[in-house]
Amino acid sequence: MDQFLQYTILGLVLGGIYGIAASGLVLTCTTSGVFNFGHGSIAMLSAFLYWQVRFDWNWPTPVALVAVLGVFAPAFGALLHITIMRGLRETTEITRITVTVALTVGALALANWIWDPTVPRRFDYFFGGTNQVKIFGSRITYHELLALAAAVLIAVGLRFFFYRTRTGVGMRAVVDDPPLLQLTGGRPERLATLSWALGAMLAALAGILITPILGGALDPNALTLLVIDAFAAAVFGRLRSVPLTFLGAVVLGLANNYVLAYFPSERWTWTSNFRISLPMILLFVVLLVLPQDRLRGGTITRARERFRVPTMRSAVVWAVILVVGMFLLREIMAPAVVNTMVIGMTFAVIALSLVPLTGYAGEINLAPVSFGAIGTIIAYHYGVTGSGVDTRMTVWGLLLAAAVCAVVGALVALPALRLRGLYLALATMAFGVFVSTMVVADTVPRVLPLLHVEFSIFPNGTLNVPRPRLGPIDLADGGTFLMVITVLFAVLGVLMVALRRSGYGHRLVALKDSPAACATLGQNPVRLKLSVFMLSAAIAGLGGALMSAAMVSVNPDRFVIFVSLGLVMTVVVAGIGYVSGAFAGGLLAGVGFVALQNMFDKVGTDHASLSSLFSFLSQFSTVLPALIGIGLARNPTGFVDDIIRAFEVFRRARVMLAAGLALQAAIYLLAYTDTFSNWWFVALTVLLWGIWPRITPLVSDRLAPAVRARRAGAGALPAGPADGPAEVPLELVGVDVPLTDEHRRVLDRALGLPETAALPGDLAAVPGRVTPSAGIPPAGTLVPAP
Amino acid sequence: MALLETDSIAVRFGGNVALDDVSISVAAGRVTGLIGPNGAGKTTLFNIVTGLLAPTRGRVLVDGADITRLPPYKRAHRGLARTFQRLEPFVSLSVRDNVRVAGQIRDTWRRRGSLGIGKADPRGRGRLDLDRETDRVLELVGLTDVADRDVAELPTGQARLVELGRALMTRPGVLLLDEPASGQTEQETEAFGRLLRRLAQEDGIAVCLVEHDVGLVMDVCAMIYVLDYGRVIAAGPPDVIRADPAVIDAYLGSAEEGAA
């Protein structure tokens, strides 16, 4: 009984802290409409900062607390809202999720940069661990009492604040209708900023209180994942109700302690993993029982994200270019680089899984790499033949991996698909953490009940995943693997474009644009989302199994949720609606940023005098992806789209394209003959294609008159500009192309005006001549004399 | 013969009564009008009929069958289709694909049990047929000229026609139109009126029209219901409605005075 009471009280304490964190999450979510996946990161950064000022710099406790809770956290929260989150109105949920995910990834990289992760940092209970009171025979530290009191105070205080103060009522109004609130004299943006400040403060408090209770050294990962516990509690309250959120938190805290107390951890080796996974499991249970969401109309009508659809022809052409280009690159790559590239391409395949799901259907999976883990495990256990050096993964193993992932995907997604997209993001993130805490952490062999065979999912914490053999093609050779995976990506990419252009793809896009309209036309939204999620999970599983095969030896660290988060973020930043976005994002997340960091490290060691600069740059490149991700708020369609647009100038300047390709070929030849190193090749290539689209319009403008004159002289084409009046809609004349005599004649005809003589010869000398580009021709030139 | 009926529908949002004891019936082969001032509950009634909202009380019947508990997509399978007052076009698709995708969705209706991928159409209607039908509907609603434009580029009046075309692609028995003429020019409205009559008379569709353009409503509707504060305050053919003192008081009077 004493033991029960002790664990109950400790459970309440833990639940109280979860509640503090979760109520902060609910607060920011309801008032700003942005669900902050980085909520745990704020807790983490604050806890580290508290350690810094209190224990490293030895500030007195009250001063340190005020500095962190009173100054740093609110300022950080408010700053986040003002600089980033405010810009997220009228973007899709995907963009919002990605930006806060970027915040998470960035904060983690930052913490690892500032506070060297190899140094253990601890901090003690407030008032020390020995100052205890006895309540009904249970020992409770002052710290725990303090946490409990804080939780109760905050729960009551928030309730009062929301219902009894003008600011609080205003905050509730912000959720419902910001413009309306503004009309009635409220200031929604200011209230939202305030709620971010308050939410960040609550996160910080939770982070500082929970650290000594969890024990051990400060761990940035674990503290960041505090957000999952907060999710589970917040979902109890449907991300709205503070009291229900606290209730959820208490259930979570108690469950955690009862498992600790009453599960036979000696016999059930998985108990401690199970305890860590409890919030994820609870989250799923809550999702299962939540009532179905009302179908809403698409708010997307005003959204800024727009993806264009390539034609099948261009998809095939680009697929061929990719394969040929990769073949040529392979010829100049060192073997080590080839292997890195293979891993990058497997990441691109995993990234491709997000294109139909997120790019087309507008749903998100925050744990694609975790499906990769499932794929790896299946392929490792059930898809391998041969022994010794001849051990190979079979095609059937890969297909089985994909199939099992599809089924697992269905199980993961089904509870959340009835609800809006955010819940699927939560469910997948919970699944991702579950995989890393429960599935790949299962390293100790144990005898399975009933079957009586010894089995562990991830024996000894390392899997030696064999390379695949596909019929006669043996992928043990890195070069062969690279070509096979490139061809696979190209084929899958073309299939994705075909999918987007098919009726199925149209239905996916329609569902994204307006779920309500789609349903009233007779589309079952859950079934459609489920099918695309299964497809996506299957591709991720296949890519993951190949990734593990490419790495040869994998450990559980490869599958932590942060790998997935980084990948998702990078792909969205690159352009989630495009296969090329998956390619660029996958390569960047898989190898790009690591390569950048390695390069800076290497250059730093080579040039000792600048080593501090280069070590800064190297650390900076770990934070860089997150910064780019946060920048997504400004450009939600992704950078691939910008590149495509930039390259459109070549449509009208084939000569320049040919010239650029010739230069590229020359660079390639120089690299091929080892005249200069591959770094030069990469640098010159990037430089060339960065500059070339920019100078092309200048050059072609200069060349165009000459070309035109030659064409007119040859008489093969009708006279007039290359972009004749017929090709440009008249309303765009003067905007897209310069106004010419020919246009004037067409306009005159269209307006029924009498034909006039050619423009006066001295028009070019009229100062107003420059204005046609603004669409306003100088007076007197358009209107003919009667 | 009433194809769509609502039976004593009531809805509350918190303490507010949005609809109270609303019973209407929409017959096949003619246009039934639903008019009333803003906030009278017209769109709420549409949302309940199509299943986007659940009523607090009452039933929705299609062809005599109770569909009150069915999800929206199953109601579409029973022949319900609608347009939206706040436009809901598929902005990523062209005008043609907006209309076409509705046909593609309809083609999946009979594929119960599968995930809606693959599997040949049991009636053998192929792609060609879908293309032809899309063209026919585009022609019917008058969007052939803009078929390849982005739907986001269209003016509101035409975007409403896209929604109408989309709804028609499902071959509905009951067509619910929520302020389809707002944003249209006078000529467009006139053509639209002709189209509505044709849909009702030639295709036998039960059309239910929510509209503020009283001229259009009086012109095309055989039967009109007037809603005010969530209650039906009058029902009958246009002549009766025009003369009804309660209607003039609540709605019409001001409109006609404004027009005069």
Image (cartoon, coloured by chain):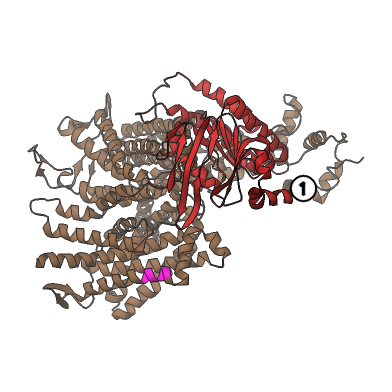
Q: Is residue A678 visible?
A: yes
Q: Is A180 one of the magenta-colored residues?
A: no
Chain under disc 1: A
For the point 44% across and 50% down, the residue is A93
Left or right: A138 in relation to A741 = left
> Crowding near pointer 1: few (<14 within 10 Å), some, many (20+)?
some
Q: Position of residue A357 (x, y in %)?
A: 40, 40
| Foreground pick, A456 / A96 | A96
Chain A colour as displayed: brown
Residue A284: percent from left, percent from top: 28, 49
Query: Residue A78: image x %, image y %?
Result: 45, 67
State which region is magenta: A157-163
Residue toward you, A203 or A527: A527
Q: Main secondary structure of the magenta part?
A: helix
Quadrant of the image containing the N terminus of chain A? bottom left
> Chain B colour?
red
Residue designated by label 1: A776
Tell me where residue A446 appears, x and y as whole percent: 10, 44
Q: Is residue A502 visible?
A: no
**In the rendered view of the protein, which quadrant contains the C terminus of chain A?**
top right
| Count of number-bearing discs | 1
Picture quadrant of residue A547: top left
Pick the front one: A53 or A90: A90
Horizontal placement of B50 versus B221: left or right?
left
